[in-house]
Image (cartoon, helix red, strand yellow):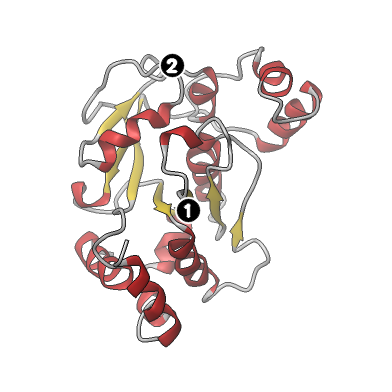
């Protein structure tokens, strides 16, 4: 797999006006450490989208849930009550605990979580996932591409969880099982203020991307009338 080949295909498929994909990976040493982020860790996405690599750690992620879902800490005791009674995202704290017990968030094996725009890395080595910041039109293409060679009912999924859970946690879990699921996210109201109103996340874990890399040009994203009309609209944004 080649980064530049994929980026050329991506631009040909979606046009030059869409965001480039964002990649993320763990490392022992930071690529570009940042100051502590108060609140949602996705506040750093503005810098990442502009081309800056960002390295986060347990010290720089200010959100307790963010530290937990990225694997840097055990679950804070207050999380079930906070998610249920404060945020009102689950009916009861027990419901949150049941969800987390089923999820089994893996602990990070390295000290830093790095985010970078795809054109800022040299290879796919050691990456955990590919994050697309997608409008509905983009989601149409991304989801159809994911369905192209996969008839499983969970080829494209949307699961309960915070923004960092739907992106980072699910990628780590899926890679560990060698899975084929992709994930639509950013339905969490807490993450939405940091992105445009028409943006959702589409995350492809590397375990699945390694297959999808080879199917892109065979899918509807190339040489079809229907997608051609959508691409034309994307280029008018």
62 sits left or right of 106 in the view: left
The number of numbered badges drawn on the structure is 2
Q: Position of residue 162 (x, y in %)?
A: 57, 34
User: What residue appears at the point 23 percent right and 36 percent down from the top-left corner?
Assistant: 53
Residue at 27% across, 31% down: 54
Which residue is nearer to you in this view: 67 or 52?
Answer: 52
Q: Which labelled disc corresponds to residue 237?
A: none
What residue sits 31% from the left and 58% below the top? Answer: 18
Q: Quadrant of the C terminus?
A: bottom left
User: Considering depth in this image, is 2 or 78 the residue closer to the camera?
Assistant: 78
Residue 187: name its quadrant.
top right
Q: Secondary structure at mark 1?
A: strand
| Residue 138 sits above or below residue 71 on the image | below
- Distance, label 2 to label 1, CA atoms, is 24 Å
Q: Position of residue 160 (x, y in %)?
A: 66, 41
52 up-or-down from 208: above or below: above
Q: Position of residue 48 (x, y in %)?
A: 27, 38
Q: Which quadrant of the figure contains the N terminus?
A: bottom left
Which residue has dot 2 on it? Answer: 62
Q: Secondary structure at mark 2?
A: loop
Q: Is residue 40 above or below residue 176?
A: above
Residue 32 spot, x, y in % from top left = 21, 28
Residue at the spot of label 1: 202
Report the side of 23 relative to 167 (left or right): left
Left or right? Give the position of 59 relative to 208: left
């Amino acid at each position: 797999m080649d980064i530049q080949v994929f980026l050329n295909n991506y631009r040909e498929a979606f046009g030059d006006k869409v965001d480039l994909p964002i990649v993320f990976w763990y490392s022992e040493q930071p690529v570009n450490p940042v100051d502590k982020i108060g609140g949602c860790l996705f506040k750093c996405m503005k810098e990442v989208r502009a081309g800056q690599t960002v390295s986060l750690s347990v010290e720089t992620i200010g959100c307790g849930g963010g530290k937990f879902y990225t694997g840097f800490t055990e679950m804070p005791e207050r999380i079930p009550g906070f998610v249920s009674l404060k945020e009102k995202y689950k009916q009861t704290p027990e419901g949150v605990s049941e969800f987390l017990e089923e999820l089994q968030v893996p602990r990070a094996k390295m000290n830093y979580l790095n985010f970078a725009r795809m054109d800022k890395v040299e290879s796919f080595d050691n990456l955990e996932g590919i994050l697309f910041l997608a409008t509905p039109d983009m989601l149409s293409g991304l989801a159809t591409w994911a369905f192209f060679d996969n008839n499983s009912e969970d080829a494209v999924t949307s699961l309960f969880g915070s923004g960092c859970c739907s992106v980072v946690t699910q990628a780590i879990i899926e890679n560990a099982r060698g899975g084929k699921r992709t994930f639509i996210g950013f339905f969490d109201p807490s993450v939405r203020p940091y992105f445009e109103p028409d943006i959702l996340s589409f995350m492809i874990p590397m375990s699945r991307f390694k297959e999808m890399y080879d199917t892109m040009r065979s899918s509807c994203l190339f040489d079809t009338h229907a997608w051609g009309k959508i691409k034309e609209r994307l280029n008018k944004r």
